[in-house]
Amino acid sequence: GGTAVGSVLLVADLGRPERFWHMLRVWRPSSPMNVGSWVLAGFGTASAVAAVLGRSRNRRLRFVGDVAGLTAGVLGLPMAGYTGVLLGATAQPAWWHARRWLPRLFVASAASAGAGALELIPMSPDEERAVRIFAIGARAMDLAVAKAMLHDLAEAPDVIAAYEEGQAGRRMKAAEALTVGALGGSLFSTKFRRARPVAGVLALTGSLLTRFAVMSVND
């Protein structure tokens, strides 16, 4: 669903729909937009096939669905950081100076949000344990990458001010607080299962705010 919406928005941003198809006629590793178009197309196709065939009663079709799901999982990593790569390739100083960190921040934030979405649905004890471990690791990484990015940008006063002041600064601080809360909720969920969905909501909101914060640094 997210890929379908994202594809429509990407095509709208390009201005003419045929430009998206033209990007798929070549493979150009030096172009973030070209590589991202291939990742988006591959991830979207694999996800759709996995959703349709993953629960098929036919063993062969179900196997195809499982392979497609695995493919979507592999492509999900570059997909999650794709927007950060695009932003870092622009001429906006606040994004360009953070070009090494934005993809990492977006991947870590996406992992936290993905775990948060899973925390909102019923699971077996083994599944809950696996999701909890993943969530704790993703949120710790999210917080660490955000701190490392700001520390690295401290050498450029104008750039660090863009992330720490104004609307972007408020959003970054709020996203950090929500992620800390989500991390705490995941840790407490071992004894208090009701903390699990709370952690999920906090993580999803924190991830969304992280992206809004980065997008608003140039406002």
Image: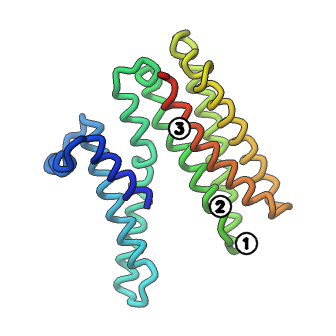
Residue drawn at x 34%, y 20% is 91
Cβ–Cβ below 8 Å for labels 3 and 1? no
Residue 138 x, y percent position in the rendering: 62, 47
Instruction: Tell me which numbered mark, 2 or 3, is placed earlier along the sequence.
Output: 2
Q: Quadrant of residue 196?
A: bottom right
Residue for point 62% across, 40% down: 141
Q: Position of residue 219 (x, y in %)?
A: 49, 22
What is the C-alpha distance between the residues marked 2 and 3? 23 Å
Name which of mark 2 and mark 1 comes first in the sequence: 1
Q: CA distance from mark 3 to mark 1?
A: 32 Å
Give, as a three-letter code, the residue at label 3.
Answer: Arg
Q: Nearer the viewer, residue 9 or 186?
A: 9
Gap between marks 2 and 1 measured at Cα: 10 Å
Vertical side of 40 occupied by 143: above or below: above
Q: Residue furthest bottom?
A: 57
Three-letter amino acid code at the position of disc 2: Val
**Seen in the image, is 133 located left or right of residue 30?**
right
> Tag 1's secondary structure?
helix
- Identify the residue at horizontal 67%, vertical 72% (top origin): 123
Secondary structure at badge 2 equals helix
Circle 3 sits on which residue? 211
In the rendered structure, find residue 131 and report the number of the disc placed on it: 2
Q: Count neighbours of disc 2 (C-alpha within 10 A) and say few if under 14, some if 14 to 19, many if 20 or more.
A: some
* Residue on which disc 1 sits: 125
Contact between labelled residues 3 and 2, with CB atoms less than 8 Å apart: no
Nearest-to-viewer mark from 2 and 3: 3
The crowding category of the residue bearing disc 1, from other C-alpha atoms within 10 Å (few below 14, some 14 to 19, many at least 20), is few
Task: Give SS at disc 3.
Answer: helix
Residue at the spot 68% in from the left edge and 42% down from the top edge: 179
Q: Are marks 2 and 1 in contact (CB under 8 Å)?
A: no
User: Residue 5: where, in percent of width, then height?
Assistant: 39, 55
Q: Is residue 142 above or below residue 98?
A: below
